[in-house]
């Protein structure tokens, strides 16, 4: 029994020590769910010998975790929320990594008669016809963007009736599952959708509009705010991500022969 | 209906192809829960017996608190452990957030009240039968506690199994303090959550089936062993 207790303590110490040469990346879920990290992280490990541990949560949660200093690198996609993050001094600069587009998806039979409309008109149609719409409602980057679109139509989404506007408060994937289950429209990013498996008869309605651009930016957690952060390792990973070679890799990343991320 | 066949097929396929990722995730799940369970038992069984056999001021209050802690939602426990282990929290200097150690700590908080609370109840019932005997023999307290645990061992096995079930099935706490990091803190339940959010419903269900098969196996083995031993000691 005593030797067993000793073993447990040894185990605890090993777990404490072995965290060397690895960083924690706080990230938005879409990059993980689309398989992007499964593709890019082994390359980083091969070139730099740095193990990147990804914690994938919504943009809001990723930023909050980083403000608690629980990350060394942050990759998110919500300019306004990033602005606040930078203003509070947790990051000195944002680095553009890549982009793709937000999309509106919905059932093929198109209850709101959206057809080929642009996204703003499509949202208006959904509002006018009171067609079921599922929102993330979780303060993520996608959620923020969706609320912005409602705002641009001079509509206040917090006053919408639950008869047609539902907030799930969960991850993108869970929200799409809900939308598919209820035959409702929802707003998502293209990378998540293209790699999503439970699509049934859902199709993309609004796509590739400049207004819907979705930029993924990286931030290094400021070491003045978080002295424990592994600033140097995070910086090496960032430089790698911004290199020409890495840009080629990003462009070459495909799901079912469709390119998921683009670079300006 | 198709999804059921798909997931059963996927589950069988995963098991017999010795899928490397599955094995990794599966063993981490059990490693975390078993360690948490053992520590909880080391503390919880003696604590429960102590509470059941001793009378002191505030005893009922303590038992009440332990019993209410059983109903703690895992997410709340996860959040509590996260706040404490966060680099900005009081134990941030340990650097164990997003490691299996953090997950073990969270699970101990979840399992310990179950072990201690149920043990208290079982030993209390037992004590009514034996108390007079032990008092008349003037048995030392430590010996009494040992005797109770040994005598109640079969009921306590069920308590330990309940603790195991709570730990192995829980997702809310480990996903917050572990972060579901590939090759590091990804366990069965967090994988199921992740696959669901990727829309891989049959894979998620397949993992659930594997978890279920495992827990049925463990429970059956333990139950049979228990009755085997009981028969040997007490006859049929």
Image (cartoon, coloured by chain):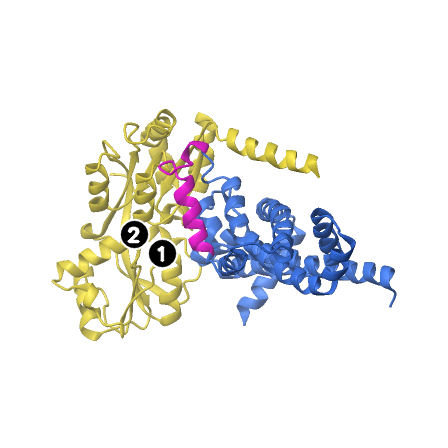
Chain colours: A yellow, B blue
Residue B131's place in the image compared with A244, above or below, is below
Which residue is more in the foreground, A159 or B39?
B39
Query: Most prominent secondary structure in the magenta stretch?
Result: helix
- Magenta segment: does it hold B84? yes
> Along the line of sight, which residue is nearer the eye, B118 or A53?
B118
Residue bearing the label numbered 1:
A172
Decide which of A121, B33 is in the foreground and name it: B33
Q: Chain of mark 1?
A: A
Q: Which residue is mark 2?
A: A140
Residue B216 % position (x, y): 67, 61
Circle 2 crowding by C-alpha within 10 Å: few under 14, some 14–19, many from 20: many
User: Looking at the picture, do discs 2 and 1 lie on one chain?
Assistant: yes
Looking at the picture, how far across and down is residue A242, in whole percent?
Answer: 31, 31
Quarter of the image with the N terminus of chain B in it: bottom right
Please tell me whether mark 2 sits on a helix, a strand or a loop: loop
Q: Disc 2 vs disc 1: Cβ atoms closer than 8 Å?
A: yes
Against A253, residue B204 (above or below) is below
Asked whether the viewer can see residue A36, the reply is: no
Residue that appears at 42% across and 31% down: B93
Whether A130 is among the magenta residues is no
* Marked residue nearer the N-terminal end (2 or 1): 2
Q: CA distance from mark 2 to mark 1?
A: 9 Å
């Amino acid at each position: 029994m005593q030797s067993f207790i000793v073993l447990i303590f040894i185990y605890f110490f090993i777990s404490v020590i072995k965290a060397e040469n690895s960083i924690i990346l706080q990230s938005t879920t879409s990059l993980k769910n689309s398989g992007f990290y499964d593709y890019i992280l082994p390359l980083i490990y091969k070139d730099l010998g740095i193990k990147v541990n990804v914690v994938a949560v919504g943009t809001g949660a990723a930023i909050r975790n980083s403000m608690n200093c629980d990350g060394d690198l942050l990759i998110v996609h919500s300019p306004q929320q990033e602005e606040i993050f930078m203003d509070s001094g947790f990051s000195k600069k944002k680095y553009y990594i890549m982009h793709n587009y937000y999309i509106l998806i919905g059932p093929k039979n198109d209850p709101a008669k959206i057809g080929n409309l642009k996204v703003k008109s499509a949202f208006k149609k959904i509002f006018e016809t009171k067609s079921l719409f599922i929102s993330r409602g979780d303060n993520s980057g996608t959620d923020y963007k969706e609320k912005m679109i409602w705002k641009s139509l001079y509509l206040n989404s917090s006053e919408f009736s639950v008869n047609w506007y539902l907030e799930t408060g969960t991850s993108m994937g869970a929200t799409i599952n809900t939308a598919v289950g209820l035959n409702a429209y929802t707003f998502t990013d293209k990378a998540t959708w293209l790699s999503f498996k439970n699509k049934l008869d859902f199709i993309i309605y609004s796509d590739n509009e400049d207004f819907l651009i979705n930029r993924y930016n990286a931030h290094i957690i400021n070491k003045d705010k978080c002295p424990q952060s592994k600033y140097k390792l995070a910086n090496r990973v960032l430089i790698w991500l911004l290199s020409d070679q890495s840009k080629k890799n990003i462009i070459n990343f495909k799901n079912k022969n469709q390119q998921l991320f683009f670079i300006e | 209906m198709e999804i059921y066949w798909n997931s059963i097929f996927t589950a069988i396929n995963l098991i017999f192809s010795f899928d490397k990722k599955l094995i990794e995730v599966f063993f981490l799940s059990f490693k975390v829960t078993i360690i948490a369970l053992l520590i909880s038992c080391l503390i919880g069984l003696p604590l429960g017996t102590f509470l059941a056999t001793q009378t002191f001021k505030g005893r009922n209050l303590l038992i009440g608190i332990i019993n209410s802690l059983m109903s703690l939602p895992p997410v709340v426990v996860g959040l509590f452990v996260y706040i404490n282990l966060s680099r900005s929290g009081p134990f941030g200097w340990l650097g164990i957030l997003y490691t299996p150690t953090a997950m073990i700590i969270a699970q101990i908080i979840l399992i310990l009240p179950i072990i201690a609370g149920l043990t208290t109840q079982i030993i209390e019932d037992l004590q009514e039968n034996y108390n007079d005997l032990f008092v008349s023999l003037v048995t030392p307290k430590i010996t009494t506690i040992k005797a109770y645990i040994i005598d109640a061992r079969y009921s306590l096995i069920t308590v330990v199994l309940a603790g195991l079930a709570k730990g192995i099935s829980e997702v809310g706490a480990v996903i917050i303090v572990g972060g579901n990091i590939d090759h590091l803190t990804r366990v069965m339940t967090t994988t199921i959550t992740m696959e669901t959010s990727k829309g891989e419903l049959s894979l998620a269900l397949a993992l659930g089936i594997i978890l279920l098969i495992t827990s049925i196996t463990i429970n059956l083995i333990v139950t049979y062993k228990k009755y085997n031993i009981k028969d040997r000691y007490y006859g049929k």
